[in-house]
Amino acid sequence: MKNIRTNSTYLACGLLFAASIMSSCKKDFDDPSRAKSDVALGSAQAMSAVAVGIQRTYTVARTGVIFNAIATSGFSSNELRLLNAGNIPELQLSTGGNAVDGTNTILFNLWASAYKVIAESNNVISNAERLGDKGYASGLIGYVTIFKALSLGTVSSFWEKVPVTTGKNVPFVTRDEGYKAAIAAIDKALAAIAAAPISSQFNATVPNLNIVNALHALKARYALFTGQYPLAISEANAVTLTVGSSFIFDNANPNVLNTIISSNNVFQPTDINLGLSGTLVPDANDKRVPFYTVMAGSPATVRMAGFSTSVIGGIPIFLPGEMTLIKAEALARQATPDLGNALIELNKVVTKTTDVFGVAANLPPLVGPFTQAQLLEQIYKHRSIELFASGLKLEDMRRFNRPQAEMKRRFMPYPFQERDNNPNTPANPTF
């Protein structure tokens, strides 16, 4: 693999620098993408190198989890339109239904990369627990757990049943259990950090990534997806919204969205309404539409902007607005719905004039009263706009009981490679 630096460059260089000033154990290494062959995984040096590779696997263009999750969700939920029918995997997803099968390489790359991340994260975590430098160890554990939790959450959003372990002939569990496995991994990481706070040396290696903040945000996301509404609210409240956490890229390994959009050969937004119709169409004055889209070309057509405009621009792990919308939805769905406070939280997103990433609707507040169904529709609408092309839309469509006619597929078929090698692979969903 030629392109190996992406955000990993920052981590590798930072780890190298931090290691050089620490006397407790030697962590420096010559090639930041791999450990020396004579160094066991029990060393901080080797674990740091593996951590670099984990992030690279998750973020690298085309084969990584990010691109394939955005493409799978985007085509299936009508966020994205196909530009070139010669891109067969994208064509299958864009067509939907039975056209999507186990040969689809987007699905295979998503599946394979996610489970590679999970397996290698487990190796780092188990070995980091034995390090003498507990502050550095907790940083490693927290860092790779972000990618492990994201991977577990991503596969759980596209398949009805998923493995939560790696190895030969692993069993499958429900997707709900997949999300809960992500939460359990986060809890373990947060406990390690609470017992031994992340050292300043490790923190200096991960620019634009607040590990604890990101872990709480992901826990809030997956608590919402599993209907644990009080937990979702408490975790969203634990997130500092003025601190962003992003995957960072560089010229050697450019922003994956920028790579795809610049080619103008794979996909673009479906239309200026982000694929929404009817009562869900964005307000004409919604500032998020010109944030995420731009009219370009001759004749002018809608193209993606947002987090795709820069070769070295970051892609957020979560948006501040997501946390606020999680609270709004959880309040509206809890056992005794609190529609008043749910509307207050929703209006924080509707009226927001800016945030750390520049995503802001800047609209007048919504005025109730709303029934629960009406309010949930508004929350879905604003999640669809606020979180455009984040890979979360298909999960939202199912959770909000959107009509099947709005989806190209509801769940994905299993890659043939998994079915051929694991007899526990379930039957494919009908749609």
Image (cartoon, grey):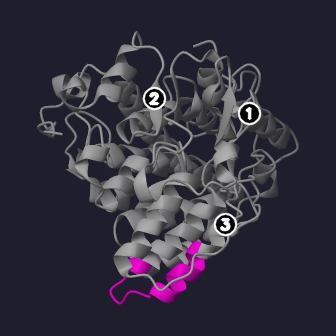
Depth order, front residue of 322/365: 365
Depth order, front residue of 163/49: 163
Within 10 Å of disc 3 (Cα), the crowding (few <14, some 14-19, many 20+) is some
Q: From the viewer's perspective, is residue 272 above or below residue 181? A: above
Q: Is residue 380 visible?
A: yes
Q: Quadrant of residue 286?
A: bottom right
Which secondary structure is most common in the magenta stretch? helix
Label ID, residue 81: 2
Within 10 Å of disc 2 (Cα), the crowding (few <14, some 14-19, many 20+) is some
Q: Which of the two discs, 1 and 3, labels the residue nearer the N terminus? A: 1
Q: Which of the two discs, 3 and 2, labels the residue nearer the N terminus? A: 2
Q: Which residues are magenta?
A: 332-346
Q: From the viewer's perspective, is residue 378 above or below residue 138? A: below
Does residue 140 appear left or right of residue 69 in this picture? right
Query: In terms of secondary structure, where does tag 2 sit?
Result: strand
As for residue 335 lying within the magenta part, the answer is yes
- Residue 70 in picture, x, y percent from top left: 48, 37
Does residue 5 appear left or right of residue 102 in this picture? right
Does residue 100 appear left or right of residue 85 in this picture? left
- Disc 2 or disc 1, which is closer to the eye? 2
Q: Amino acid at mark 3?
A: Ala
Q: Quadrant of residue 231?
A: bottom left
As for residue 299 lying within the magenta part, the answer is no
For label 1, the residue is: 12
Depth order, front residue of 108/264: 264
